[in-house]
Amino acid sequence: MSKNRLEAFSDGVVAILITILVLELKIPHGSDWSALRPLLPVFLTYVLSFIFLAIYWNNHHHMLQATERINGKILWANTHLLFWLSLVPFVTGWMGENHFAAIPTAAYGMVLLGAAIAYTILLRCILAEQRPDSPLAIAVGRDRKGNISLLLYAVAVPLAFVNEWVADLIYVTVALIWLVPDSRIEERVKPKV
Amino acid sequence: MSKNRLEAFSDGVVAILITILVLELKIPHGSDWSALRPLLPVFLTYVLSFIFLAIYWNNHHHMLQATERINGKILWANTHLLFWLSLVPFVTGWMGENHFAAIPTAAYGMVLLGAAIAYTILLRCILAEQRPDSPLAIAVGRDRKGNISLLLYAVAVPLAFVNEWVADLIYVTVALIWLVPDSRIEERVKPKV
Amino acid sequence: MSKNRLEAFSDGVVAILITILVLELKIPHGSDWSALRPLLPVFLTYVLSFIFLAIYWNNHHHMLQATERINGKILWANTHLLFWLSLVPFVTGWMGENHFAAIPTAAYGMVLLGAAIAYTILLRCILAEQRPDSPLAIAVGRDRKGNISLLLYAVAVPLAFVNEWVADLIYVTVALIWLVPDSRIEERVKPKV
Amino acid sequence: MSKNRLEAFSDGVVAILITILVLELKIPHGSDWSALRPLLPVFLTYVLSFIFLAIYWNNHHHMLQATERINGKILWANTHLLFWLSLVPFVTGWMGENHFAAIPTAAYGMVLLGAAIAYTILLRCILAEQRPDSPLAIAVGRDRKGNISLLLYAVAVPLAFVNEWVADLIYVTVALIWLVPDSRIEERVKPKV
C-alpha cells in the first residue's frame, strides 16, 4: 500500500492546523500598539504551538521517508496522532486567553503528552513492519529523545498546578530539544536514499 | 484519466473538514475545569465525527487504491460524497450544542445516511468500470458491511425521535464496525500491488 | 516547468473554498426543525456554490490534463481565476443571508462572471502554448459552452435588479449546462492518454 | 531527501492562508451597495495580500524547481518563511479594519519585511547546497530584486508614521516589481529541465 496518500493527508491536516492557529489571534479594535498588548500571551502561545506543529511535521517527514510499507495499523496510529494534534489550536487558545493560568497550562501539556504518546505508538507500528536492523530502527535506537520528551511532559502537567511558569519552561525546553531536526534519522537514512 | 488529482482533492477536502470540526470547540472564558464541562457533549460529538471522517478517508483510500480508471461519472459521484461529508461539521455542532437532543440527533443520522448512500453509489460507479472478477469486486463481494451500515442508519434516524440515546448508540456501533479498516480489500488487493 | 504544483495549489485552494462555504451555515440555537427554517436560503445558496466550485474544479482538471507546458503567464492567469473563486464564499453568504435580495444576487452574478472570464483567459493562455491542432484546441473548438455561460451571466446581472428570481434561475441553468463534465475534452483527449 | 513533501506542505499552508484571508471580509448585514462601502478598505488590503501571497507562492515554486537537495536547515528556513506568511491574514485584517491607520500599516510592513528576510535566508540555504555556478545561482546573481524589496520595506515601515499612504504606495510598488514572475530563474533553468 502506498504511503503517498498518508503523507499527503497528514501534510494537509498539519498545514491546516498550523494555519488555523492564527485565527486565535483576534484582530484588535484599536489601531495603536497598546491594542496589541493583550494579544501578547496569545501571540507567545501561537509561536510555541507553531513550532511544536512544525517539529511534528518535520519528524513525521523524516520517519515516513524511512518507511516502506504501510498497513491498516499504521494508518490508524497516524490518525490517532492527528487527533491529538487537532486539539492543539483549542488548548493554545485556552492557554493564551487565560494568560498561562494553571489549568489551561496543564491541559496544554496533556495534549502535548497525548501527541507524544501517539507519535511513539506510530513509530513502534512502523518499526514492527521493518527488519530490526533497518536504517530507521538503527537511527531511532532506544529513542532517548522521545523518552525524555514523554518524561518531561509527564512531569510538567502536575507541576503546572504548583507553578505554571515551570511547566511553560519545560514545554519550551522540549521544543528546543527537538528543534534540531532528527539528525539521527537524516544521517543514517541518507546513504540508503 | 489519472486518479491522482481526484485523490488529492478528496484528501484536501476531508483534511479540511476533519480540522474545521475543531472550530466548533469554542474556547471557554473561564480557566478552571468547570469551564470545560459544558463542552463535554460537543467534545464527544467531535470525537465521533473525527472517527467517521477518518473512516471515510481510510476506506476511500483503500477503494481508490484498487481503482484504475476514472471517468466523469466517478468524478461526480465522488463530489456527491464530499457534499454529504461537508455537512458533517454543521450537524456535529448542532448535535453537540444541543446535548444530543432528538432532532439534531436525527439530522446527524440523516447526513451519515446520505454519506453512506453516496459512498455506495461511488463504489458502484467504480465497479462498473472494472471487470466483474477484479480484485475490488471480489473484495467487496455483496458489500455486507456497507449494507448493514445503511440499514442501521435508516433505523437510527426515526428511532432518534423515540429515544435519542438509542440512535447515538447505533452511530457508535456503526463506527466500531468500520473502525477495523476494510481488511477485505486490503488483503485481496495486496498480492496484485 | 512542471504543472504538478500548479494543480496541487489550485486543488488546495478550491478544496478549502468548497469547505469554507459550510462555515456560512451558522449552527442554529434551537433544537427543533423550525430552527433550521431561516437557514434554508443559506443552504440553497450553499448547494449552488458547492456545485459551481465543483464544476470549476472538474473542468480545471480536464483542461490541465490536456496541458503540457506551463509558463509564467499561465501561472498568473490561474491565480486570477483563483482570486475570483475566492470571493464565492463571500457573495454566497451575502446572497443567502439576504434571502436572494436584488443587489446581493447581482453581486453573486458578477463574481461568477469574473470567474468565467478568468477561466476563458486561462484557457486562451494554455491554448497559446499549444499547436492549433492540439487535442485541447480541437476539443474546445469555438468554446460554445463557455461563450453561452459568459452571455448568460452578463444578462443575469442587470436582470437581478428587475427580478432577482430570473437571475437565480439563470445561475441554476448555467450550472446545469456544465454539470455534464466537459465530455468534449474527455473524449478527444482520451485516445492520446 | 525528497523535496516533494516540502513543496506539498508549503503549497498547503499558502493555499490555506490565501483562502483564510477572505474570512476577514465579514458579510455585511444590509443588502444594498452602501452596505459594502465600509468593506472597501478591507477589500483593497485583501487584494494586496492576495497578490503578495501569490507572488511568494510563485517565486517559491520557481526556486524549488531549481532545487535538488533538501537538508534540515532548508526545512527550518522554509518553516520560518511560513511563520511570517502566517501572520499576513492578521495584519491584513488589522490594517483593513482601521482604514490604513499609521501603526497597522507599519505592522503590515514589518510582517512583509520579516517574510522577505526569511525568503532571502531560505534562498541562501538552498544556494549553499549547490555549486556556485548552478543555474539557480546564476539566475539569482546578486539578487537585485530581493535587495531592493528589503530596502523598500525597511524604508516604508518608519515612513508609515510620517504618512501612511506613502508606505502603502511602497507596498504596492514592491508588489508590482515582483508581479512579473522571476523570469531570470524561469529562463535560465528552462534549458536544464
Image (spheres, coloured by chain):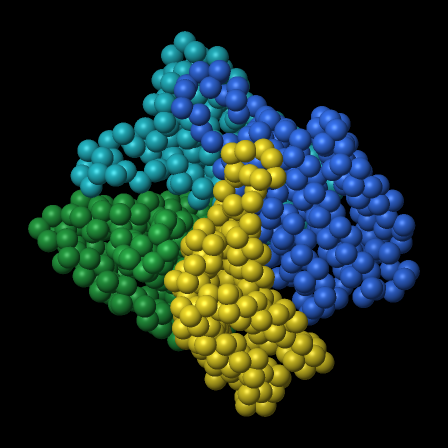
Chain colours: A yellow, B green, C cyan, D blue
The image position of residue C132, as x and y in percent, is 71, 35
The image position of residue D149, as x and y in percent, is 80, 41
Q: Residue furthest left?
A: B162
At a point 18% along the width and 61% down the height, the residue shown is B169
At a point 53% along the width and 80% down the height, the residue shown is A148
Q: Is residue C59 left or right of residue B119?
A: right
Q: In the figure, C95 relative to C80: above or below? A: above
Question: Taking the image as drawn, is residue C128 in sight?
Answer: no
Location of the C terminus of chain D by quadrant is bottom right
The image position of residue C72, as x and y in percent, is 74, 41
At a point 30% along the width and 32% down the height, the residue shown is C39
Q: In the figure, A16 relative to C150: above or below? A: below
The image position of residue A44, as x and y in percent, is 56, 55
User: Which is more toward the observer, D46 or C8?
Assistant: D46
Q: In the figure, C128 relative to B127: above or below? A: above
At a point 54% along the width and 33% down the height, the residue shown is A30
Q: Is residue C123 left or right of residue A149?
A: right
Q: Is residue A22 left or right of residue C2?
A: left
Q: Residue furthest bottom?
A: A133
